[in-house]
């Protein structure tokens, strides 16, 4: 046998293990110090009561012969597809049930979607960004072209017609920068993709944090997007499903004359056996009035944390992106420090842990990610410590 040599070209990611090692070493040397973590990208609030009730009742159904379910439709049960369709409908976006595919989360689909695209596509990926896009393409042996997300463009790169691309990744609101595209900016991307005959793989995993008018929550709010875009969405950050696992992907009928939709259906029915019934019932509960209210409460809780961090940075006069329509705050390291230098400085002098921007790409050097997913108490204390340290 021969191994897939492309795997040897994937950069080893030591970002989170390096962080863990540094924090463990610091804590071992300073056991009396309380370290506060604002580095994690995982949620901390528990599942909403409406979701838990749905899980219980679906589990009971599975325990009775008359309501037991075995294999379900690979692309998701109609009840959940219908709930997702309604979620788009409210925003004036009309989708057909056949365009919605239920998944076990955005990460799997973002990786698996590459199955339907040819080997010789030119891939365009922003730098910095969520590392999965690059790694999955490298594993598949594709060459990646980068577009620069920088302070100058507000970490929102725009299309350059002198650059040719076939597969374009956009992530809005962005991980790690928290920057979110406006509908107008997305329209420029849609026009570019349609002009080039390219596809936009649009990662909307953080759409639920968008509150400002004029910013995009779905690329399908933009005219022409159904001819050139696939959208990936997730219950992970929206409803705390990081460990429960559920998401959805929209592959429009108009894309490649319906071929992309049918190929994705074929791919999923061949290689995937669907999301557990219990989990799909839990996800359905997210869209009930109780679920909505409870989940909005959780999102507000995180966004309040984001405001606490943002206010501290404003007081310090530190440049940052995100925080308003995203649980991520992306700040410029003060005093011209490098990402890791600032990481050490913050850990040693304020016992606050964040994520060095350099871990998300070349353009992340000199920047730093803080997240709003912690508790309010920890967030407040961390913001105070950062203020006290940097005001000096
Ligand atoms: N997309 C982005 C931008 C993310 O940051 C993450 C997770 O952190 C995901 C997708 C993965 O989401 P899921 O939990 O649905 O696989």
Image (tube, grey):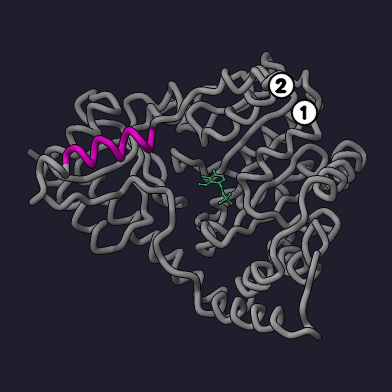
- The C terminus lies in quadrant: top left
Q: Please tell me which residue is depicted at 47% across the width and 52% down the height of the picture.
A: 325
> Residue 158 location, x and y as percent?
59, 28
Q: Residues within 10 Å of mark 2 (few under 14, many from 20)?
A: many
Q: Secondary structure at mark 1?
A: loop
Q: Quadrant of residue 193?
A: top right
> Residue 222 location, x and y as percent?
71, 46
> Residue 233 location, x and y as percent?
64, 52
Say if 91 sits above or below 132 in the image: below
Q: Please tell me which residue is depicted at 50% across the width and 63% down the height of the picture.
A: 240
Q: Which mark is residue 198?
A: 1
Residue span colored magenta = 15-26
> Residue 172 location, x and y as percent?
56, 43
Q: Please tell me which residue is depicted at 66% across the width and 83% down the height of the picture.
A: 60
Q: Is residue 58 magenta?
A: no
Residue 238 in sight: no
Q: CA distance from mark 1 to mark 2?
A: 6 Å
């Amino acid at each position: 046998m021969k191994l897939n040599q492309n795997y040897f070209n994937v950069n080893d990611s030591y970002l989170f293990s390096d962080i863990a090692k540094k924090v463990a070493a610091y804590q071992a040397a300073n056991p009396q110090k309380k370290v506060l973590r604002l580095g994690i990208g995982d949620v901390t609030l528990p599942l909403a009561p409406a979701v838990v009730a749905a899980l219980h009742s679906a589990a009971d159904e599975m325990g009775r012969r008359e309501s037991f379910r075995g294999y379900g439709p690979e692309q998701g049960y109609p009840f959940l597809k219908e709930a997702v369709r309604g979620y788009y409908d409210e925003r004036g976006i009309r989708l057909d049930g056949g365009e919605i595919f239920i998944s076990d989360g955005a990460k799997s689909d973002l990786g698996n979607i590459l199955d339907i695209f040819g080997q010789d596509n030119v891939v365009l990926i922003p730098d910095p960004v969520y590392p999965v896009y690059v790694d999955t393409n490298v594993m598949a042996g594709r060459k990646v072209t980068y577009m620069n997300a920088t302070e100058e463009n507000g970490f929102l790169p725009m299309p350059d017609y002198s650059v040719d691309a076939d597969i374009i990744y956009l992530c809005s609101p962005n991980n790690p920068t928290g920057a979110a595209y406006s509908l107008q900016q997305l329209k420029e991307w849609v026009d570019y993709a349609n002009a080039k005959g390219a596809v936009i793989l649009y990662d909307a995993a953080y759409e639920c944090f968008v509150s400002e008018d004029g910013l995009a929550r779905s690329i399908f709010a933009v005219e022409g997007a159904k001819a050139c875009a696939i959208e990936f969405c997730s219950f992970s950050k929206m409803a705390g499903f990081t460990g429960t696992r559920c998401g959805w992907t929209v592959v429009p009928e108009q894309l490649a004359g319906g071929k992309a939709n049918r190929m994705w259906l074929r791919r999923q029915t061949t290689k995937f056996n669907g999301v557990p019934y219990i989990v799909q019932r839990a996800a359905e509960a997210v869209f009930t009035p109780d679920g909505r209210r409870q989940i909005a409460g959780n999102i507000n809780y995180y966004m309040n944390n984001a405001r606490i961090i943002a206010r501290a940075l404003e007081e310090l006069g530190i440049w940052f992106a995100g925080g308003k329509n995203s649980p991520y705050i992306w700040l410029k390291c003060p005093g011209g420090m490098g990402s890791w230098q600032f990481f050490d400085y913050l850990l040693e002098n304020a016992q606050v842990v964040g994520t060095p921007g350099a871990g998300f790409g070349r353009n992340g050097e000199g920047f730093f990610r803080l997240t709003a997913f912690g508790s309010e108490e920890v967030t407040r204390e961390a913001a105070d410590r950062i203020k006290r340290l940097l005001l000096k």
